[in-house]
């Protein structure tokens, strides 16, 4: 009986340690998102004024708008800034209804 309890405890302890180690060493999403330069190369500055205004009305923050545009660019490389803005606006409106 003592052997069964000991083996069970050892197995549970090993599982808990393994689970903790896998969670502790996951790569962070923050490091995988490309950085945004706050100078003239920001995506928001390359979006048409009408789309820029519409996007800023939805998020109220230039940094948030740039982050959303950059994330969409990561998933859809090669798309124009206006297409990215339209996609972000569509996604925000869809998710809010």
Image (cartoon, rainbow, N blue to C red):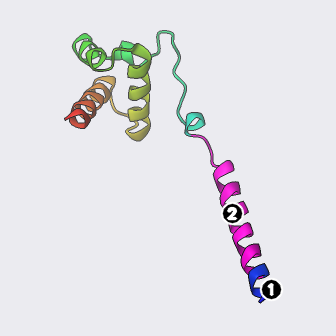
For mark 1, give the secondary structure.
helix
Residue 97 location (% of width, % of height): 19, 35
Please give the count of numbered marks on the rendered protein.
2
Q: Is the residue 77 above or below the residue 60 in the image?
A: below
> Which residue is at a point 39% across and 28% down the rendered structure image?
68
Q: Is residue 21 magenta?
A: yes
> Which residue is at a point 30% across and 25% down the rendered structure image?
85
The residue segment tinted magenta is 7-28
Most common secondary structure along the magenta stretch: helix
Assess whether mark 1 and mark 2 are in contact (beta carbons under 8 angstroms). Answer: no
Residue 2 badge: 1
Tell me: 30 left or right of 59.
right
Q: Is residue 31 magenta?
A: no
Q: Residues within 10 Å of mark 1 (few under 14, many from 20)?
A: few
Tell me: 29 left or right of 76.
right
Q: State the residue in front, 77 or 7.
A: 7
Which quarter shows the N terminus? Answer: bottom right
Q: Is the residue 31 above or below the residue 12 in the image?
A: above
The quarter of the picture where residue 74 lies is top left
Residue 9 location (% of width, % of height): 74, 74
Residue 50 location (% of width, % of height): 22, 13
Q: Is the residue 25 above or below the residue 77 in the image?
A: below
> Which residue is at a point 80% across and 86% down the rendered structure image?
2
Residue on which disc 2 sits:
16
Q: State the residue in front, 22 or 87.
A: 22
* Residue that protrudes farthest toward the left in the picture: 97
Residue 47 location (% of width, % of height): 31, 17
Distance from the alpha carbon under mark 2 to that under mark 1: 21 Å
Q: Which of marks 2 and 1 is in front?
A: 1
* Residue that protrudes farthest toward the front in the picture: 1
Q: Would you say residue 9 is visible in this rendering?
A: yes
């Amino acid at each position: 009986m003592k052997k069964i309890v000991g083996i069970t405890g050892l197995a549970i302890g090993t599982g808990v340690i393994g689970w903790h180690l896998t969670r502790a060493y996951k790569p962070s999403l923050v490091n995988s998102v490309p950085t945004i330069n706050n100078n003239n190369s920001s995506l928001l500055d390359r979006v048409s004024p009408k789309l820029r205004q519409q996007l800023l009305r939805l998020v109220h923050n230039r940094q948030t708008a740039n982050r959303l545009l950059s994330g969409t660019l990561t998933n859809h490389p090669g798309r124009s800034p206006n297409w990215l803005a339209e996609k972000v606006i569509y996604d925000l409106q869809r998710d809010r209804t």
